[in-house]
Amino acid sequence: MPERDKMQLLKDILLWEIRMPFSTAPKSLSEKSQEEGIPAEQELEKVLKALESQGKDVGQLLVEKGFLTAEALEKVRREQDSSGLGLPQALVRLKVVSAATVTEVVESLGRLILEEVSGQSLGQILLAEKTTDEEGLKKAERLQQQAGLNLEQALLELKLIDLETLGKLYQKHFSIPWIDLKSVQLDAKTVRLLPDNLMRQKHFVAFRKRGQALDVAMIMPRDQSTIDRLQIITGLKIQPHLVDLRALNPVLRKFVPDVNEAAKARIREIATSDIQEASEEESTVHLVNKIIEGAVNARATDIHLDPQDDHLRVRYRIDGMLYDIMTIQDQQMILVTARVKVLSDMNITERRRPQDGHIAYTMGDRKYDLRVSTLPTHLGEKLVLRLLDDTTVLKGMRQLGFEEQDLAIVEQLIRRPYGMVLVTGPIGSGKTTTLYAALSEVNQANRNIITIEDPIEYQLPGINQVQVDSNIDLNFAEGLRGILRQDADILMVGEIRDGETAKTAVRAAMTGHLLFSTLHTNYAVNAVTTLRHLDVQPFLIAGSIICVIAQRLVRKICPHCAETFIPPLPVRLELGLPKNSRKAIKRAVGCAECYHTGYMGRTGVYEVFSMTPRIREMLIGGTSEERLFEVAREEGMTPLAENGKGKVLSGQTTFDELARVIYI
């Protein structure tokens, strides 16, 4: 392989530009290079030379360890040359791996390379401990490639090592115990704590529960991404144990029966009238319950069930990011989809039109509402389940992340008797949470508060909430006109989408009502331009708006694993620090507490644009948006980016996270 190709392959693996979650790989070379002022190329060359000193290159290593065949590697490299794609994307395009597993595969490749360079690979350990010789190791690696086993199981299969000896090496070098399943009395209740499909795919079984810890026998006990997924699904601390696949298979056959070919054919040909009955079988009910419980344990806001060619991809949205959790094989896809639709009271025979439904779910002593929607795609129905939990949304204004100066302004303005307060930002930026928090602040027994929403996500005590219904032509504008005849003091319109709604909202704010609503604009001052485009006269905008809040959500850095470091010069300058500043900021690392993402929870980044007399006069005069922004800054407004930089400097989030959310 040419030197350039070797380096590019190494870059594709070790410097994959998107740091994915569930990764326990050491600090990326790019971060290390930035910190120490060493070019990343030099670090990569060191890794390349270390491999070559062992008589290997990157491609040979991947083939030798059974991750890719020589033919597959060559095919991938040709695809990269012709398309310009990186290694992960080429692997997916050629269907060498699926989109759902590519992150796991690339991270495994990275760990393999770094272990090989550091001398911590299992093969090197076995040779150093004189447990096997070069010839035995090569024999095991050949079987690994031919049979699709990992190295541990290949060694055991060839009887080059016994489980006890291998287990002691694991305990010594990796602090991972081993288990002989023949000596364990398995309990079906414990085994069933884990999803059947994952047990079959990844070859593991839960064999003991100790309080909040769960002992799991695995053929790949160093597969941290799978361990993290099991912790999410169960809410328990997973303790992996090395096991022999030959002892594990009989256990899986006993407790987790596979779907045979006849059953697969029956599912594919099953009559529509029988789908509901089949979807209520224990295995399907158990799997769907585990998917929902896992989302609750992970603090997820959404569950995505995405149909692929031959499987259903399950993803959770945690702190605003979508993470792959598991895959469901094709024979179960239709049953899982049908089960969710039955729970949501949907028509299970309708697969050509989008549908909406609702699930009331109880887990322990907590109740959750799940809003479910389906969307027909060419591969099947895609489902999204949104988890609605009052405790995560119904917060006070002080819990949202406002800086003290902005909070004081907002709290003062929302207590005015009339006028319009707008919250702007893209979908998923937390606008609804801010609106609900503001309504809670002004919710008093002597006030009549009415909202019109699409949909009503949370029940607000003491507030009258109206649901938009297109079937009867009840839209925002029509509903708002009806609300104005209800002697309301405070109004909330879920979203201003059109000119009719905008004009009605402005009229309400001008006639003695305090009105809250949202607009889809990027920045606070953009709201003025948007209302102009909706044919609202400038003098009406100036007379009705009292405040516009633009916002984004950024992930908060995990307090358990965050590292401090001196940022490189470009980052110091971007943050407004002097060139020679030694001010430290924090970066994400990843630990078991945050599922190795480096982040835990989210906070808001805000821009508060208040209608001062000077701005009102300029607005009536037709001043441009750019000039309004300049004057707003002069009048005390802190722009979104500046607010976010303050959160980086105070250690609440990272510069990388801010750059991901806000263009800076």
Image (cartoon, rainbow, N blue to C red):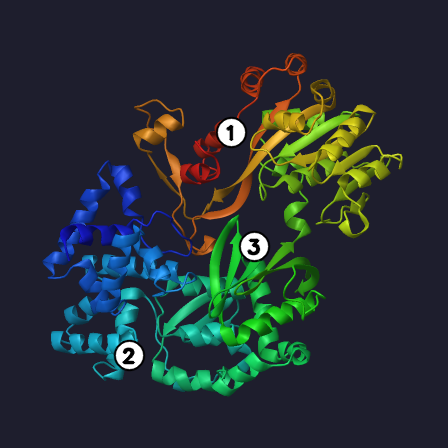
Neighbour tally class for label 2: few under 14, some 14-19, many 20 plus, Cα within 10 Å: few
**Residue in the image at 68% along x and 45% along y:** 394
- Three-letter residue code for mark 3: Arg
Gap between marks 1 and 3 measured at Cα: 26 Å
Name the residue type under label 2: Ala
> Which residue is denoted by mark 1 in the rendering?
643
The one of 651 and 302 positioned closer to us in this rendering: 302
CA gap between label 2 and label 1 equals 55 Å
Residue 361: image quadrant is bottom right
Q: Which residue is mark 2?
A: 147
- Which residue is identified by label 3? 299
Percent from the top left, x then y, of residue 243? 35, 78
**Mark 2–mark 3 CB contact (< 8 Å):** no
Amino acid carrying label 1: it is Asn
Q: Secondary structure at mark 1?
A: helix
**Which structural element holds mark 2?**
helix
Q: Nearer the viewer, mark 2 or mark 1?
A: 2
